[in-house]
Image (cartoon, grey):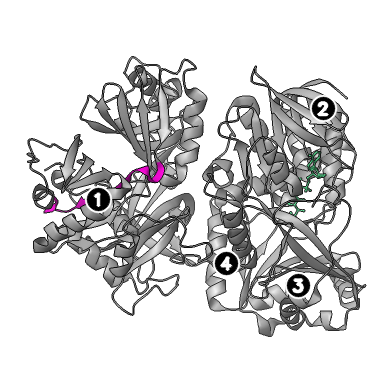
Amino acid sequence: MKTHARVVVIGGGVVGCSVLYHLAREGWTDAVLLERSELTSGSTWHAAGGCHTINGDPNVAKLQKYTISLYKEIEELSGQATGFHMTGGLMLASTPERFDWLKALSAKGRYQDIQTEVISVEEAHALMPLLDPACFVGAVRTFVDGHLDPSGVTHAYARSARKLGAAVETHTRVTDIKRLPDGGWQVITDHGTIQAEHVVNAGGLWAREVGRMVGLELPVLAMEHMYLLTEDMPEVAEINRTTGKEVAHAVDFDGELYLRQERGGMLMGTYERACVPWSPLDTPWDFGHELLQPDIDRIAPSLEIGFEHFPAFQNAGIKQIINGPFTFAPDGNPLVGPVRGLPGFWSACAVMAGFSQGGGVGLALANWMIHGDPGFDVWAMDIARYGDWASLAYTNGKVQENYSRRFSIKFPNEELPACRPYKTTPIYDRLLAAGAQMGDGWGLEVPLWFAPEGVRDVFSWHRSTDFEHVAAEVAAVRGSVGLSDISGFGKFRVTGPRARAWLDGILACRIPAPGRMTLAPMLKEDGKLIGDLSLACLTEDEYFLAGSGMAEVYYMRWWEQHLPPDGSVRVEAIGLGLVGLAIAGPNARKVLAKLTHEDISAEAFRFMAIRKLDVGFAPCLVGRVSFTGDLGYEIWMKPEYQRHVFDRLMAAGEEYGIRLFGLRAMNALRLEKNFGGWAREYRPLYGPLEAGLDRFVAYEKPADFIGKAAALKERASGGTLRLRTFVIEARDADVIGDEPIWLDGAVVGWVTSGGYAHNSGVSMAMGYVPKEHADADSGWEIELLGARLPARLQRAPIWDANAERMRG
Ligand SMILES: Cc1cc2nc3c(=O)[nH]c(=O)nc-3n(C[C@H](O)[C@H](O)[C@H](O)COP(=O)(O)OP(=O)(O)OC[C@H]3O[C@@H](n4cnc5c(N)ncnc54)[C@H](O)[C@@H]3O)c2cc1C
């Protein structure tokens, strides 16, 4: 075995082998994969081998499409068959709600060039004669889905990687990993030690244990999973004979089942509600090529539906039931990327659909390691979406919820209950008492809207019970004053003698003078957006940044990678060490003025100013800014003051009819100002010009900020996309994101977010379209629940286009 390598990949499952292959393909051949047993000895060997392109997140769907396209390539290079059968597939709906959901999913795929077709039950029956048409209402057909040989694929990746010069060592178990003083890693195995610049954790079922070797508690949990294999079935032989094809792959969502042909019989698997975690605390090292005891009672309710929906199974003999474990992150998406605080340590784990996603994960990770960037938008599977708060117990609860809901509909207004409440702000009880309907903001309870006694969300694709109440919250803000808990923002403090110079190089904006704030786009080297923050200068060497709460670890990882080694700059994530309240509306100033002795007149406390101010008794940091686009203040304070400040603001606002508002009202308010948000309008896919943030980019500033050259190029070329806002002729439902945008009968773009702008009384959407079409005066349509609705471009904000209210 080598003693030195540029990269050590731990784990010879489908994911580790894919990572090794992609590294070698990109030229990093000084890479060695270590596998404690034979290749495939984790969850890989007993997988059902199904693969699909469709995913709820369109960017993950894109990587799945890439994965499937790889199989030919690795088969040719390695000479190892992958056993890939492209049977095509059907996603079946038993209820109209499910059919709506499938139509929306299929529409999402449209702009990603993922071919799907909405078909009738009769058409579905013709394609998949095993189904009983009486049990379904319709289907979506997919074309590049199929199944493969899990072992063949894994060996094809490994052999291809070897051919390109990478090494694979089997029967070599990593027992410990140590950080070297020079920044590299020492990987200790039962066959010696290897020094490496980079280590990839692709430990699959043991990813958690491998993480613990470097002090990480990864949010990963294995679940038991069962599928059955039938004896040969005459009905299958008949389909093969008459069509000359294999039986199409099928997902029966309402039965919570998937099925495909396996030799002359069928395979049927289920994500049962009564799911069971496997080895929730520690994964045994002696678990190998073995299976778990099947528990037929647990899957019986699903099988009963399956046998009813696919009657031929009733006469089929069951040959075997496979029960094997595989891993999940709390949201079911992989955990990929560099690990914060551990330079050169990479994660490629929690890949629950290795045969759909393994290729994309390998490509993204190899790009990231070699070129410093994944090369795609991998936000949905970036390990940085979780922080320390995603503990073992939290992961356990959320993974079970996710597993048991794998085939369930998630309505746009639905909030999932597991592991809640978890993080709360000090005014949580006050908000609940006021009727707050809470949402889950990455572990934090955040108010979505405030309901009168006896009213709550009814989950729906259409406007629901919250509509009129959110409208009233919006009216309170625009008409007088509203108050909201904004503690969920990510908050950061940057200090030190070189803080200003450092920020000047990290952020694309001009760094404000003391007492001033600015919007601060943050770019990566290729000029794409990796942050949308607000930056406040408190003193020359103290700065306050606020941005999306879910990006806290993501931002910190980036900043820590770029901090000067001499300690002249310090960055700190404040988390809930600072909580916030926002007041907004034309009477906001009058409310605040009642609680402070200082002059906060329009002249003394201007728009985008920030200052320390006592509010009531409490020392606060107050910025004159509001995401509502109205006259407003963001008030930051230590948690122990929040109840006091809340009570005082509510009392001071009483004479103005102050009203609490939640995130849904905030959405309605920001939409009519054309304000975008992180992970929707602003993502690593878009440049600042494309996203309309170029006015905050200081192209001419002397500092050579990250992404400057690329941003200048984008400005010169005009980029390729434009963010646009639309008003849609919607009737009883509004867009949520990812719907296709049509122009003159062709799909040209996609919606990033939207909703009903109550104050303006219109349904709105924001989304990206190619720049050459971006100013078309007519011909726009937005697809919503299977219908193409006329839309018009809303160039200037529909409300307060000159920002007089916000600046007044
Ligand atoms: C019953 C069942 C059906 C499934 N069906 C499908 C399906 O139809 N389609 C699909 O896409 N996915 C399916 N899956 C999921 C799929 O199996 C996983 O997504 C995939 O196997 C994950 O691969 P991996 O490489 O991440 O992990 P693993 O396969 O667990 O591989 C990890 C490897 O790392 C090695 N390792 C761990 N620690 C060390 C160490 N310290 N030193 C050296 N080596 C180490 C292990 O021995 C193992 O070989 C199914 C899973 C099950 C259980």
Looking at the image, is mark 2 or mark 4 nearer the viewer?
2
Q: Which residue is mark 3?
A: 128
Query: Does dot 3 land on a helix, a strand or a loop?
Result: loop
Q: Is residue 579 magenta?
A: yes
The residue under label 3 is which amino acid type? Met
- Report the span colored magenta: 575-588
Residue 347 screen position, x and y as percent: 66, 38
Q: Earlier in the sequence, mark 1 or mark 2?
A: 2
Residues under numbered marks 2 and 3 in contact, where contact means CB atoms less than 8 Å apart: no
Q: Earlier in the sequence, mark 4 or mark 1?
A: 4
Position of residue 496 in the picture relative to residue 228 (left or right): left
Q: Which residue is mark 4?
A: 102
Viewer-proximal residue among 280 and 200: 280
Viewer-proximal residue among 596 and 463: 596
Residue 771 screen position, x and y as percent: 41, 39
Compared with residue 487, is residue 619 higher up or lower down, i.e. above or below? above
Q: Earlier in the sequence, mark 2 or mark 4?
A: 4
Looking at the image, is mark 3 or mark 4 nearer the viewer?
4
Residues under numbered marks 1 and 2 in contact, where contact means CB atoms less than 8 Å apart: no
The residue under label 1 is which amino acid type? Ala
Query: Does dot 4 land on a helix, a strand or a loop?
Result: helix
Residues under numbered marks 3 and 1 in contact, where contact means CB atoms less than 8 Å apart: no
Position of residue 75 in the picture relative to residue 764 (left or right): right
Q: Earlier in the sequence, mark 3 or mark 1?
A: 3
Q: Is residue 559 magenta?
A: no
Residues under numbered marks 3 and 4 in contact, where contact means CB atoms less than 8 Å apart: no
Rounded to the nearest angstrom, the CA distance separating label 3 from label 4 is 18 Å
Rounded to the nearest angstrom, the CA distance separating label 1 from label 2 is 55 Å
Q: Earlier in the sequence, mark 3 or mark 4?
A: 4
Viewer-proximal residue among 498 and 761: 498
